[in-house]
Image: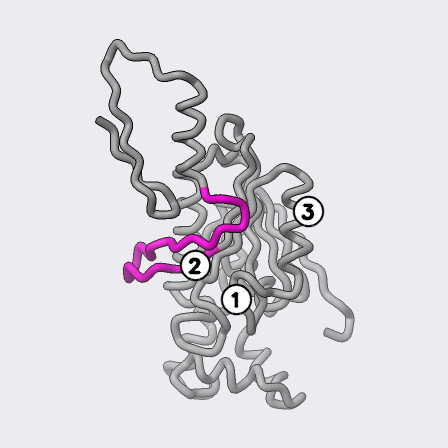
Amino acid sequence: LSVVTCASGLVVFLLTASHMRIPSRVLAIAVGLLLPLAGETVRIPSSMDGSPQPAIVDVPSTAEANPTPLLVHLHSWSTRFDNSTNFADVRAETAKRGWIFLSPDFRGANNHPAACGSELSVQDVLDAVDWVKQRAKVDERRIYLVGVSGGGYMSLMMAGRAPRVWAAVSAWVPISDLVEWHSFSVRKPQRYAKDMEACFSGYPPTHGFALQQYRRRSPVNFLELARGLPLDINTGIKD
């Protein structure tokens, strides 16, 4: 007796004997139940604090048997896993290519301590990738990462923090240094300075411990570890 819990929470029981051959059609149905439906919101337990973290996952039927590239989309600064500005375009291109699409939440908008490049948020991205790998046939040599603005920021963070996971990383108009960006946002002025302070217990990066944390969550301090990883950075000259 085999007991399988599906992504949707449905439990499947398969009763087999050692001499029994299960028809391929039955196996296909059983395996299909393990995979999320296209566009399904799943809840992925955090390996750090156990909290369920939402994500959108699209798995083409071909990924049940054939190694398939995985594209991980990271949402922008003030949005979440399902409503980033470029979400629909990236998702559509992924479907066009027949790839697996994953858009994790990694603690939502960057306006509270658990978000903004925290240890929790970094692990959330890695947990989501592992979750998909356990449920679909991912080509581990072709796991790609892309993000815009705040998603570009987190893409650079993940490039530096986990360079061996990715085949390539594309970051569009990313933030690379939170200390410098806080200063820029104060001068502009922009609300992002207050968002950052909310992530660091209300402090600007002039406070000793807060300054350490701003630096610890700045990709520029980790990117040397991504040496050899194909990294595509795109930004405007006035951004």
**Magenta residues?**
36-55
What residue is shown with label 2? 54
Dot 3 and dot 1 residues touching (CB under 8 Å): no
Above or below: residue 215 compared with residue 185 = above
Q: CA distance from mark 3 to mark 1?
A: 20 Å
What residue is shown with label 3? 93
| Tag 2 secondary structure | strand
Q: CA distance from mark 2 to mark 1?
A: 9 Å
Dot 3 and dot 2 residues touching (CB under 8 Å): no
Residue 101 location in percent, x, y?
56, 46
Query: Within 10 angstroms of label 3, few (less than 14), some, or many (20 or more) residues?
Result: few
Residue 73 location in percent, x, y?
57, 54
Residue 218 location in percent, x, y?
51, 69
| Tag 3 secondary structure | helix
Residue 56 lies within the magenta run: no
Query: Within 10 angstroms of label 2, few (less than 14), some, or many (20 or more) residues?
Result: many
Above or below: residue 118 compared with residue 33 = below
Q: Is residue 211 visible?
A: no
Q: What residue is rendered at 55% in x and 59% in y?
A: 74
Kindly give the residue lying farthest to the top in the view shown: 19
Q: What residue is rendered at 45% in x and 47% in y?
A: 129
Residue 34 location in percent, x, y?
40, 37
Q: Is residue 184 visible?
A: yes
Quadrant for the C terminus in the image: bottom right
Three-letter code for the amino acid on which mark 1 is drawn:
Arg
Dot 2 and dot 1 residues touching (CB under 8 Å): yes
Q: Earlier in the sequence, mark 3 or mark 2?
A: 2
Three-letter code for the amino acid on which mark 2 is drawn:
Pro
What residue is shown with label 1? 80
